[in-house]
Amino acid sequence: MRLKHVTFAASLVLLLLLLAACGGSEESSNMSAGSTPVVTNAPRTAYPMPPVKSAAELNRSPYGWTSLNDNRQQRLANYAGHVVVLDFYATWCQPCREEVPHLIQLQKQYEARGLRVVGLNVGGAEDQDKVPGFIKEFGITYQLGFPDEQMIDLYLSDDDRIPQTFVFDRDGRLVKRFVSYGADMPAELERTVQMALASEGKQAAINTDADSTKSVIAVSH
């Protein structure tokens, strides 16, 4: 009896191995040279990644955020003539914490040319009380606020990973969206900001000392 059980078990293992081998060969054939793999879900890619909503919808949105500095309601439209970096973060988010020093440096370096960095906390109600300590810990000098729920839905409905960083030009048009934070992101973000600053924009309300070479930025849709 024991031998029969061993023989049956060995046969079952062999059958499973054969089935696995068939599955592997089918996958390999699907990935042959020149073929495109088919996935059922959206890939978990990093930046840049366009939002579900169009850039025009983001620009025209009546939703905004409550400024931590003066408790006033703000909207993207209030920043016409400036290049705006909207950063969605939470104090407990490690990649967000890694990004903060770079955002501080960007604001310090390019503020005179019209850059405005705004950090928007999406860590939940319990995280809002931790923001003052977060400011003190990092010495944050850029603006902070709490976004409307409708604004969160508008910007993050398709991908709620954080940090997420949106760059808008002087006319309020979306230039690029960064999802998550990686080693190459700081340099790419700074290049994006520099190019946006180099374009004066139709509604520019401030003078800039931008380079004479004007860059054309593709708007993400």
Image: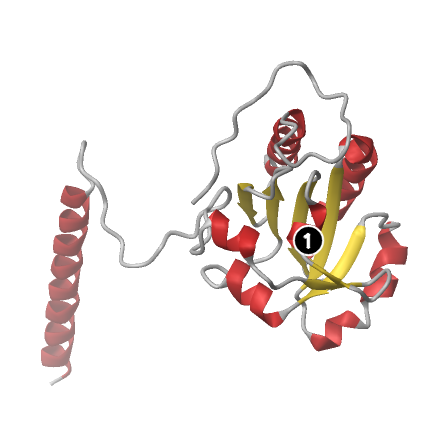
Left or right of residue 58, residue 52 in this image = left
Q: Nearer the viewer, residue 90 or 154?
A: 154
Q: Quadrant of residue 65?
A: bottom right
Res. 160 in view: no
Q: Secondary structure at mark 1?
A: helix
Q: Amino acid at mark 1?
A: Cys
Colour scheme of this structure image? secondary structure
**Callout count:** 1
Q: Please give the residue where the numbered disc 1 appears in the rendered image.
A: 96
The x, y position of residue 33, in whole percent, is 18, 32
Image position, residue 94 (x, y; %): 68, 56
The percent coordinates of residue 220 (x first, y second) are: 46, 41
The residue furthest top is: 212
Residue 130 drawn above or below residue 203 = below
Quadrant placement of the N terminus? bottom left
Which residue sits at x=52%, y=25%? 216
Looking at the rendering, which quadrant does residue 125 occupy?
A: bottom right
Res. 9 image quadrant: bottom left
- 1 sits to left or right of 199: left
The residue located at (9%, 79%) in the rendering is 4
